Structure formats: structure tokens, C-alpha cells
Image (spheres, grey):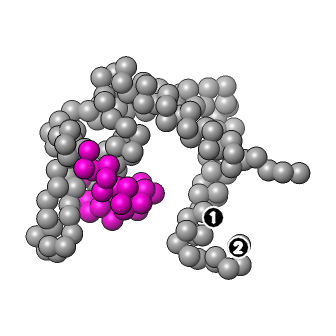
Amino acid sequence: MESKGGFYITQIKQRQERIFEKLLRENGIEISGGQGRILFVLWKEDHLSVGEISRQTSLAKNTVSIVVDGMVQKGIVERTVNPDNRRQTIISLTEYARTLQENYEKVSQKMNHLFYQGFSKEEREDFERYLVRILGTLTQLEDGDNQEESL
């Protein structure tokens, strides 16, 4: 029997991103999904390197750099050189980005409600445990751990 889980995950991800961006626009927040992922990380801990943002968002470093370029142009984040390591760029929130957080979190909560509509608490918890297992396996493979025996 052919497993279709990966196919469903891809479809869910694409639809979720479109719906989430629509909800953001309806609430006056003009940012893309990638920008939102970066903001989410920076709201938890400001002043991070591109590499750290990449690690926490699972976006490639070059993707983070490209997305940050657009965010700098919109006045959402700033780039500065790390005074302790001049080869490292630090990304920081602007005051404008801080004003977006409350509305972004409200939209995010609404999206979570939509995502789990019709699920019991136990079903949601089981589902999330399965997702964590899948993410762990994929993270190990990407990081090169157990690559030969898993493939």
C-alpha cells in the first residue's frame, strides 16, 4: 500500500500558507509566510545571526538572507555587523515590527483554531506527537546523522 502522508503534508502546507497570508492581509499585516517565520523567531529572541535564524526556522541561509532583504526594505528588521565577529550579520527587529506582534499572534491563534477544527484534545495531541517524530527523523537525515542506515 502506497503511503500518501508526505503528499498530504505538502498540500496542507500550501493551503495553510495561502489562508494564513490572506488572514494577515485582512488584518492589515502585509508580510509573507517566510517573513512571518523570521519575525516569530525574532519576537522570541531579538538580535540573531542569519545562521541562527536559519536553524530556528528551517529555512536555508540564502533564503533567510533574501527574505531579510525584503524585510529591511519594508522597515521590519535592521541589519548590523556583530562587533565581536565582523563577518557575522545580526538581524534585529525595528519598532514597527514590534507593533505587528499582537495582531500577528491573534491571526496565528485563529489559524490554529481553524487547523484543529473538529479535533478532540487527545486527537490534536496524538497528531502533534506524530509530527514531532517525523520532524525529528527528517532533521536527523538533513543533519547527516544515521544517513546511511536510514536510506
Dot 2 lies on which element?
A: helix
Q: On the image, numbered disc 1 is attached to which residue?
A: 137
Q: Examine the residues drawn in magenta and state their main secondary structure.
A: helix
Report whether residue 57 is seen. Answer: yes
* Amino acid bearing label 2: Ser
Q: Quarter of the image holding residue 132?
A: bottom right
| Label 2 crowd bin: few (<14), some (14–19), many (20+), radius 10 Å | few
Magenta segment: 46-70
Report whether residue 56 is seen. Answer: no
Q: Which numbered disc covers residue 150?
A: 2
Q: Which residue does the image show at 45% across and 57% down from the upper left?
A: 58
Q: Where residue 94 sits: x, y (%)?
A: 16, 43
Cα–Cα span, label 2 and label 1: 9 Å
Residue 69 magenta-drawn? Answer: yes
* Amino acid bearing label 1: Thr
Q: Which residue does the image show at 63% across and 64% down from the upper left?
A: 137
- Furthest toward the right, the residue is 1
